[in-house]
Amino acid sequence: MFKRLIIFILLVSSFLGHAQTYQVERGNSKYNVFAFIEAQKIYLKLVEDGYVTAEILAKLGDTYYFNDDLKEAQQWYRKLFVKYEDSVTPEYFFRYAQSLKAVNRYDESDRLMAKFSSFKGFDMRSKRYDEALGYLQRIDFQSGRFEIANTKEINSYTADFGPAFYTSNNQVVYATARDSGSILRERHSWNNQPFLQLYTADADDKGMLSNPKRMSSSINTKYHESTPVFTADGQTMYFTRNNYDNGVYRQDKEGTNKLKIFRSYKNKGKWSRPEQLPFNNDEYSVAHPALSPDGKKLYFSSDMPGSMGYDLENEFTGSDIWAVDIMDDGTFSAPRNLKTINTPGRETFPFISKSNILYFSSSGHQGLGGLDVFASVISPDGSMGKVVNIGKPINTTYDDFGFIVNDDTKIGYFSSNRPGGRGDDDIYRFLQLEDLREKCQALVLGNVSDQKTGEPIKDATVVLMDVDNNKIDQRVTSGDGSYTFTLNCDQPYILRVEKEDHTSDEEVITTTTTSGIMHISLEIEINRIPVADCDDIGPLLDIKQIYFDFDRFNIRSDAAYELSKIQAFMELYPQVSVEIRSHTDSRAPDQYNQILSDRRAQSTRNWLISKGIDAARLTAKGYGERRLLNQCTNAVACSSEEHQLNRRSEFIVSSLEKFKDCD
């Protein structure tokens, strides 16, 4: 029976092992074709059944990460790092760091990014992190230039995003996954929502949207359509669609259906059958078109060859912003990569305003978490200006994207999956209160350290003042002694550091004339020594031993110098009392040494009293030869130097009114 039981257990274990292996393979097959919702269900069931591996935790986190649910993703990445951090690949340091921002754990995110940065040569995201220290202060400095509201009047309980101005801004066209009418559309395996279609909505002079309607069936198909853009005359439209044309659904070599940009012309009020753009390809995506104000350039997002947007493990492809010239005959130049603004992360959803500012979303530039909206001024020669995070409240720890603005009315729209919306992604309208060009800012990155040791000092207060010594702001240094201020350009300031029981330090600075970073180091040192009852303050004050000549109890000149340190200490700490302990060597009878040590202790006490120390704060006691520091007894032959080590004094402190027993 025992043998049969063992065989049965082995058979069951083998069966369960094969079943789990099968489920893992099944989940991975779904994951590899981006069917993340189906893969997620399989991985969750495996974890629920107690089957947990680094691969399952990583890919389970990915199924949320790639669906922009960073809050949920960070929980699974956390489990991955708790159990398997030593074997985690560098890419997951980046993903986990990005996910932590969604729950406002920026310090931990920065720690992981610092670790990611230490993987030399991994990719440019680490370099950009090193260059972006103080990014949260920069974002705060850029914030507060918008009033926003949810366009609840047109948002559904599914995804609504990617607005575009149409017919002189009296209408907005956007993508939605809503089901309406009698059509029940198929659902996409990536996020289990209906495929997107393009809708129009009417816009009033305050940006309020109403009357959502599905666009023509010549534009919408049973697959995805999204992110349109229109020429100024409203007669030409570019938009994104799955690789589905004329009833044919195409996939790449791995079986994935990519995105393409299509163009349609309006003729007698109807849209023509859309045509593909020539730089589309079955093997990569081309999506999210945007037009320059003059209509002569088309910008878009793509992961085509030459993109910086990839991870080195080839697990998931990011995207870059690209541009092409539109010729007079409607043809296009070769695509060119906007390398100065792209990162190995994800750059997407471009929009060019009337004032020639390129807005786009990115996960590669430093932001608050997820996709943030950034801006870059396009120069007349086509070069790109500095990339600037446009700040809160447009940007949050969630995905914020699809930004468009009318420079004349200052009214615009953007998309976000932040909490408080009606559905998944919602469209928000805003009123722009200030110009979006970067404010001139000087970022002061400083540190406070110990003047003697160079060690960083935590919890020091750095006070920012104007030249008239009026306090403007203050910071408390972190564990590494660092502090930051974001200041106006070309202005004088005073920085002063203070900490209890320390000296202070002060620096007069003038900030940079253009936006930049200043490194200001401040140094302080302790001027009060922390002591406790029964401490021997000799080592604390770096006092050399108070030595006496053989058979003498007078204070030597070298001893007087050291005793002056005790005097200064007792003057600085008036609440402290000191017991003076004197010791002798063993080269005389015990009774004689006891008397001699008492006299040495009293001699030391009298010297301190002569210098103004209150006698009530001093006691003196001789210990004779009872506490030798070595083996130099009468029975042991020692040198004079060895005997001198035992002729010493100690200074034991007490903060009590009565001296406590410190033996």
Image (cartoon, rainbow, N blue to C red):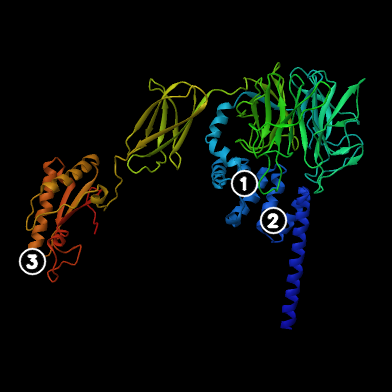
Asked if disc 3 and disc 2 are in contact, CB closer than 8 Å, the reply is no
Mark 2 Cα shell of 10 Å, populated few (<14), some (14-19), many (≥20): many
Residue at 65% x, 51% y: name it: 76
374 horizontally vs 523: left or right: right
Report the disc number at residue 635.
Answer: none
> Residue at left 78%, top 51%?
38
**Residue to which mark 3 is pinned:** 589
Residue found 20% across the figure and 44% down from its top: 565
| Mark in the foreground, 3 or 1 | 1
Disc sitting over residue 96 in the figure: 1
> In the shown orientation, is residue 613 left or right of residue 18?
left
Of 430 and 164, the residue lying toward us: 164
Residue 578: x, y in percent?
20, 49
Disc 1 residue type?
Answer: Tyr
Q: Tag 1: Cα neighbours inside 10 Å, few (<14), some, or many (≥20)?
A: many
The residues bearing labels 3 and 2 have C-alpha atoms spaced at a distance of: 80 Å
Q: Is residue 620 visible?
A: yes
Name the N-terminal-most of marks 3 and 1: 1
Amino acid under disc 2: Ile
Residue beneath the point at 64% across and 45% down: 95
Q: Who comes first in sequence, dot 3 or dot 2?
A: 2
Q: Is residue 595 left or right of residue 536?
A: left
Q: Amino acid at mark 3?
A: Pro
Does the rendering let one see residue 348? no
Q: Which of the two discs, 2 and 1, labels the residue nearer the N terminus?
A: 2
Quarter residue 375 falls in: top right
Q: Which mark is residue 56?
A: 2
Q: Kindly report which numbered mark, 3 or 2, lies closer to the viewer in this rendering.
A: 2
What is the CA distance from the residue labelled 2 to the residue labelled 1? 15 Å
Rendering coords of residue 557 (x, y %)? 11, 46
